[in-house]
Amino acid sequence: MKNFLKFLLAILIICSLTIGGLYLFQEKFIFLPKDLDQDYTYNFPSLATNVTFEELFIDTQDGARLNALYFKVDTPKGLVVYFHGNAHNLSKWGAIASQFTQHNFNVIMLDYRGYGKSTGKRSELAMYQDALVFYKKANELFPESQTTVYGRSLGATFATYVASKNKPRKLILESPFYSLTDVLKIRYPYLPAEKLLKYNFNTGDFVNGVTSRVTIIHGTEDGVVPFKSGEKLFKVFPEDFRKMIQIKGGKHNDLATFPEFAIGLYGELSY
């Protein structure tokens, strides 16, 4: 019995240390940024010859400075406001602009606080406010009636938030989650998710304010954001304004390699 009690105590200590470590260092797991020198020069050799881009800086009320890239084609059909995932920076994400420019859409992308050249103290509220400031800048460049808001993974939360506060033409979400708590519950059901997370990123909370048509694209074998969480988000949008494109066998970072992704994306952009 004594040995059994020692074993239980050891398990409790290990669990406590694990949960405590996750709570204290959760930003290290949620955000995976890479910074850039302020004089870094962006270069995207894969862009078509008819595509140009310019670098933009957006100042916020709390003193942060946000870095963005604006990709332009000769005769744009509209603008895509792109919110990227939780890793790296615009030096990587900028290459994805070609998914939209090849269909004659301009694209504007933002680096979050602490990513690339963007500065500022990070908080969930500050990131939501940054998304609105960024969207306001986008509206200065292109009419909102021709604007599609696009969010990938973590960026889907900001995209949905922006769409809930504005009236873009369309909202497209790639590999989104219902909430960060929901993801943690699915992947680690034994952890006290509600008490553990300081960041909620509850995308589902913003659904009621969205009035534009919504398309969700998600891989069925996504090991980062479970398909189940994306499906849960899809179901809370009104039936008449939602569509889901399931990429069978698709994972979190390979959806663009599936032909149904390109076909579906072009169809939704053009719809």
Image (cartoon, helix red, strand yellow):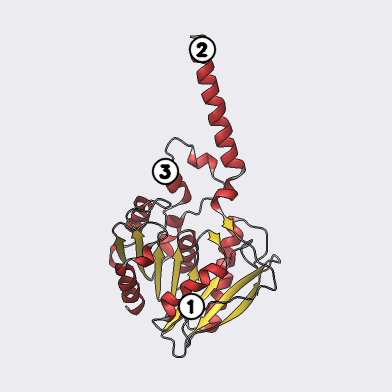
Report crowding for label 1: few under 14, some 14 to 19, many 20 or more residues within 10 A (C-alpha).
few
User: Residue at the spot x=61%, y=63% of the render?
Assistant: 115
Q: Secondary structure at mark 2?
A: helix
Q: Which residue is mark 3?
A: 187
Comparing labels 1 and 3, the label whose residue is closer to the camera: 1
User: Callout 2: 10 Å neighbours few (<14), some, many (20+)?
Assistant: few
Decide if residue 171 is in sight here.
yes
Q: Nearer the viewer, mark 2 or mark 1?
A: 1
Q: Tell whether 89 sits left or right of 102.
A: right
- Image coordinates for residue 183, horizontal then vertical, percent: 43, 48
The residue singled out by tag 2 in the image is 3
Q: Is residue 265 left or right of residue 81?
A: left
What residue is drawn where x is 56% and y is 30%?
16
- Pointers 3 and 2 in contact (C-beta within 8 Å): no
Relative placement, left or right, of 15 versus 67 is: left
State the image coordinates of residue 143 (x, y, percent, origin top left): 48, 83
Residue kind at label 3, given as amino acid type: Arg
**Secondary element type, mark 3:** helix
Measure how far apart labels 3 and 2 are at the Cα level. Answer: 32 Å
The three-letter amino acid code for the residue at tag 2 is Asn
Mark 3 and mark 2 lie on one chain; the one further toward the N terminus is 2
Q: Residue furthest top?
A: 1
Marks 1 and 3, Cα distance to the nearest angstrom? 36 Å
Q: Name which quarter of the figure residue 90 lies in.
A: bottom right
Check the image and report above or below for 45 versus 210.
Answer: below
Q: Is residue 168 visible in the rendered structure shown here?
A: no
Q: Is residue 215 above or below residue 108?
A: above
Label 1 sits on residue:
46
